[in-house]
Amino acid sequence: MSETATSPKLEKVIIIGSGPAGLTAAIYSSRARLNPFMIEGEEAGGQLMITTDVENYPGFEHGVTGPELIAVMRKQAERFGTRFLTRNVTKVDLSVRPFKVNVGNQEFLAETIIVSTGASAKWLGLPSEKQYYNRGVSACATCDGAFFKEAEVVVVGGGDTAMEEANFLTRFASKVHVIHRSENFKASKIMLERAQKNPKISFMMHTAVEEIIGDGKSVIGLKLKDTRNNEIREMKVQGIFVAIGHQPNTKMFGGQLTTDEAGYIKTKPGTTYTNVDGVFAAGDVQDPHYRQAISAAGTGCMAAIDAERWLESLGE
Ligand code: NDP
């Protein structure tokens, strides 16, 4: 169901973003009779829409694809009355209540807002990266590591994410090479040392990935460049994990919601409360640490309950 409202109508709850956090918030808030309105974005569903197999989402014994998981959650939210608008929010004004949410020249008013706009993995920007995405190229070891049993893989990056991904991948892979473009690490000492001590991990410094080589079906190797002398060489690998950081999708809230220095929305510990009363944040947009579909869904549930109780406290 789509909605094309023309005059501002006061909504109890507007949910911005439609990954597992937003959809879980929608299920809970529609069951709480808050009649939520979800502005799901033109690329609805978030990162799960570009994930093939999800084997760690509880309740799916034999796994589920990311798009299927999103489709089921969306139907569940719709069954309880959630209304959807498949457009991108262009502007929000959180300075006064009711809050204003703009989609182009359409304006919506909301008593509460649940922000679940997610985060996006940063990519190297190589055409081959897109071509072999999910066929040897990944940005999530927790999601895809188990598909690389006894394989030789690389992790690109020099931050904590890269160290964590490399360590995790040694549970499956026979060998993990960390490829970093310089010799200075952003990773914390403890994480770096843990990776350096792991006998399955080796480090290739001053190295950049020039191209991902595939056989048409999956990744078979990489073209690498030495960043000091531009020398090119090739290496055989079956997998490449890009771990050069994530970008929370918080641009539209700039100056209104408090974020950390990386742009993640700050929430009051143990809750989904943001610095603005009546605005709640759930999922990856406020989570630089776990970034899992199930933890996003969990915080989506929390946001719906927080919003419901907050409205109740106002006598709504
Ligand atoms: P960071 O920004 O810390 O590190 C990104 C790394 O990727 C840097 O080494 C950077 O290299 C490299 N990089 C960036 N762009 C490119 C590119 N285009 N090509 C090649 N390399 C590139 O991001 P992280 O995701 O690692 O960490 C983000 C935050 O999350 C940090 O605060 C971190 O501490 C935290 N975190 C904590 C964890 C934990 O405590 N368990 C686990 C994971 C993350 P360069 O240095 O040259 O710029």
Image (cartoon, rainbow, N blue to C red):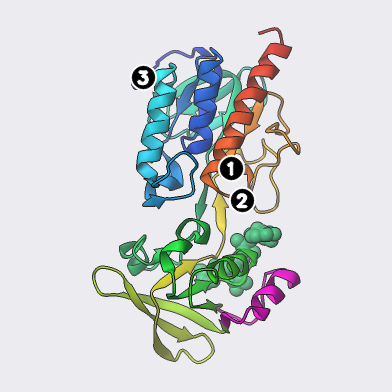
Outermost residue, front direction? 61
Q: CA distance from mark 3 to mark 2?
A: 36 Å
Lower sequence index among marks 1 and 2: 2
Query: Which residue, given by chain and number where applicable, does mark 3 sit on?
Result: 4
- First of labels 1, 3 by sequence position: 3
Image spot of residue 172 (x, y percent): 49, 69
Q: Is residue 242 left or right of residue 87?
A: right
Which of the image's four quarters has the N terminus? top left
Q: Position of residue 96 (x, y in %)?
A: 67, 21
Q: Which mark is residue 290?
A: 2
Asked whether disc 1 touches disc 3, contact meaning CB atoms under 8 Å apart, the reply is: no
In the picture, the disc for residue 295 is 1
Cβ of disc 3 within 8 Å of ligand 1?
Answer: no
**Tag 1 secondary structure:** helix
* Segment tinted magenta in the rendering: 181-202
| 188 inside magenta stretch | yes
* Type of amino acid under label 1: Ser
Residue 93 in view: no
